[in-house]
Amino acid sequence: MEQALIENLKKLVGDENVIHRFEDRFCYTYDASFAEIDQKNIPGAVVFPETTEQVAAVMKFAYAHKITVIPRGAGSNVSGGTLAVADGLIMVLTKMDKILEIDRDNLLVVVETGVKTGRLQQEVEKMGLFYPPDPASLAFSTIGGNVAESAGGPRGVKYGTTKDYVLGMEVVLPTGEILNTGGRVIKNVTGYNLTQLFTGSEGTLGIITKVILKLVPKPEGKKTLLAVFNEIEGAGQAVSGIIAQGIIPTTIELLDDVYIKNIEEYAHVGFPLDAGAVLLIEVDGDKEVLDKQAGKIERVCQAAGAREVKIARNQEEAEELWKARRAAFASCARLKPTIIGEDATVPRSAIPAMIAKIREIARKYEVLIAVVGHAGDGNLHATFLCDEMNQEEMARVEKAIDETFYAALELKGTLSGEHGIGRAKAPFIKMQIGEEGYRVMKKIKLALDPENLLNPGVMFGE
Amino acid sequence: MEQALIENLKKLVGDENVIHRFEDRFCYTYDASFAEIDQKNIPGAVVFPETTEQVAAVMKFAYAHKITVIPRGAGSNVSGGTLAVADGLIMVLTKMDKILEIDRDNLLVVVETGVKTGRLQQEVEKMGLFYPPDPASLAFSTIGGNVAESAGGPRGVKYGTTKDYVLGMEVVLPTGEILNTGGRVIKNVTGYNLTQLFTGSEGTLGIITKVILKLVPKPEGKKTLLAVFNEIEGAGQAVSGIIAQGIIPTTIELLDDVYIKNIEEYAHVGFPLDAGAVLLIEVDGDKEVLDKQAGKIERVCQAAGAREVKIARNQEEAEELWKARRAAFASCARLKPTIIGEDATVPRSAIPAMIAKIREIARKYEVLIAVVGHAGDGNLHATFLCDEMNQEEMARVEKAIDETFYAALELKGTLSGEHGIGRAKAPFIKMQIGEEGYRVMKKIKLALDPENLLNPGVMFGE
């Protein structure tokens, strides 16, 4: 980027909020996705605005000079939604990190975009309130990033995902105007639902600067169960059986045999090495119903062939069970150096069929695929264990991933349940949304960003 | 409309599905809104498509001939969203009324647009499932209309509104292409959230032909309470107090003194004539917690100064209490011939301030205003009782309504919580969403409907 432009940027956001040395810029080339870092895509500068007005000024400037802008929170997205573009501008929003207001009476919170999700959760829980969305990245990912990606998490089955908590936002349009959407009321039908249009638009339509989020009262208590199955089919039956009982658990996490063996050898949590699948189930709510629900779930699991159902007697035992689930991804590093976690999602009832298909794909391409995931909402994470230095293997892995996508769509599912499309899945998007869906998206994108300067390529794949 | 065009329409949808005699067309001039019927706005023809392909063919035809199209379900919207346009085409979607699939495992239903909401609810309840949105019109309004308006209802406080249940849809674009959005999974972040863009777009962006709706398990039981207050302030305090206890009731309905007196004289339900306000509160869920919650609510109401709290002992007693609430609107007809129910909505904590403001407005303009509403989510219905034959009074009523809108916005509320903007509130929309919000909406509208032929004027007010 020309020095004159850098100087201009410094005037807009302050000297201390612009970095442009090569080694600094290089650090903002990538995100948490599995994407090859393209040495050609080194950004021209990185800015750290501190106010909405600065974000707007930078966007106006970028538009005047036709500079590409990539907005970014913690960069923890796994779909290549914040990868750099050659000589473009990276806009890092982590300095805008104030919790502006926790409104107890109206069960809402107003935050700046860079607030970490985990911090927000801690703050509201101190007041007896609860912000349910729980992406695995919550300790470091930002609310703005969560909203831009419409992030999910294990609690989705009962509580929905980020989108279900966004009541309104302040967003800077690609051309630099500041827009406010939604508001502080749950019922609000004035105008188009722009709030939900921007939520999950992956930074392609605007830069989210403030968010109004809905909260719920913190549940009284919770109960955690672990059910062990010889065959994964039994686990699938149990999931349907629980829902048929009218119980929507907070989480229904599934681990397959590859994961079970791997986690046990890594973390020694007491999983039987010969199990076919385990379900980690949690219910929350009023104390009076937790035992009843846990009992019902236990019986459903037994009827579906569980060889063991463990109910955690206290918070410590529950923590032990969750430790195993959390160790899942990390444990994979023992087996292979490269771990690619996909999130093609199917309707809940199609889980057994999807798992069978994934195994068929693993055999066909001789690729190691483990399955972990949020079984309650069909949001499986097929995990491809491989070695990116092995080109021959990677070619097979790529084919196996493609076929996993086709399988999910065939089962009336979606390419992405919670990770987003980014650049990684952009080449596949038409397969799901069709030519017409793509055309409508493109029309909206061009209406708001006629020069295609904000996060170009993301979702659209051009 | 020229005879040649009529003949063409008949070819597209069949002779029996086109009507064009003056007296038939006249019947489709109006909807359930309080809007003067403009004799000049008689539609040119009315079509009743039976399939999505017919809807698409008619839209293509309309676009080719630059004919305005007003889509319509039962015409029960109260904001003038389906009023006719001179020589335009009315498209009535009530013949597309099949429930295509109830998917118990995945807790969803697939329906055609013209299915009546009440019928859908009955059908899924037979299977132990529950579709919560409950607009007052549910016995006759259609799902397509509910989705287009993002209809609400008393249960919004706990269960949200129509938008929270729409997982996907089939929609015919203004230019006649068929688009499918969303899908059968709860977690779905592939592409822009077009589902929520079309939901609540009031028939201005496309014609909804099919909808995939989320269901929840039917709650085990419910409990209904009536709390009587001397002063409306106490009722407002009780609402905040209940939420502060961590209880989100299914409904918290408020009736003010004008309504109490009026309902009692009309329906003799046993309301004390000198009460300042009553709250009708319902909780649902597991049987074990209903008594506990009812007890807590009773104590909160007493602490807030309730002079009486009645807990219905059985379904019959609960029905009696609800009869009173349902009689509210009808009871007004005793007092005045013209009843205008507004739905400006405020954050829950602003209910006392909003009610005080409404009373001030009533005094200032010497207009009779009663207040009923969904207090749990701040969705009040200020009801203007007047006589449309009295021009002088109507001028005052108009000013009072305008001032009610200003008051709601000043209290960080919204022009419309659940009725929609339509033509009735279109002149006010910029006040809430601002010039920028309006511009963004307009860009989206023009991107999809460049000739502005689909429901023109609705929301935008031109």
Image (tube, coloured by chain):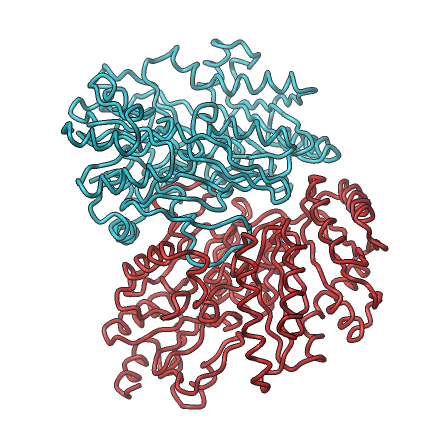
Chain colours: A cyan, B red
Instruction: Say whether residue A377 is left or right of residue A200.
Output: right
Q: Is residue A268 above or below residue A226?
A: above
Determine whether, in the image, residue B234 is placed left or right of residue A37.
right
For the residue pair B24 and A117, the one nearer the viewer reads as: A117
Q: Quadrant of residue B381?
A: bottom right
Name the quadrant containing residue A222: top right
Q: Quadrant of the C terminus of chain A?
A: top left
Task: Depth check: give the residue in front, A48 or A368.
Answer: A48
Check the image and name the residue furthest to the bottom. Answer: B22
Report the front residue among A373 and A240.
A373
Q: Quadrant of residue A292?
A: top right
Residue at 33% from the left image edge and 43% from the top image edge: A206
Q: Identify whether B18 is placed above or below B155.
A: below
Is B400 rendered above or below residue A419? below
Residue A305 visible in rendering: yes
In the rendered view, tell whether residue A190 sits above or below residue A87.
Answer: below
Considering depth in this image, is A458 or B340 the residue closer to the camera? B340
Q: How many marks?
A: 0
Q: Is residue A397 visible?
A: no
Which residue is drawn at the image coordinates 27% and 20% (left, top)? Answer: A27
Residue A37: x percent and y percent?
Answer: 22, 22
Query: Residue B8: x, y in percent?
Result: 27, 81
Q: Residue at x 45, y 73 (%)?
A: B82
Residue B303 picture location, percent across and down:
81, 46
**Residue farthest left in this picture:** A2
Q: Residue A8's x, y, as percent?
A: 21, 33
Q: Quadrant of the N terminus of chain A?
A: top left
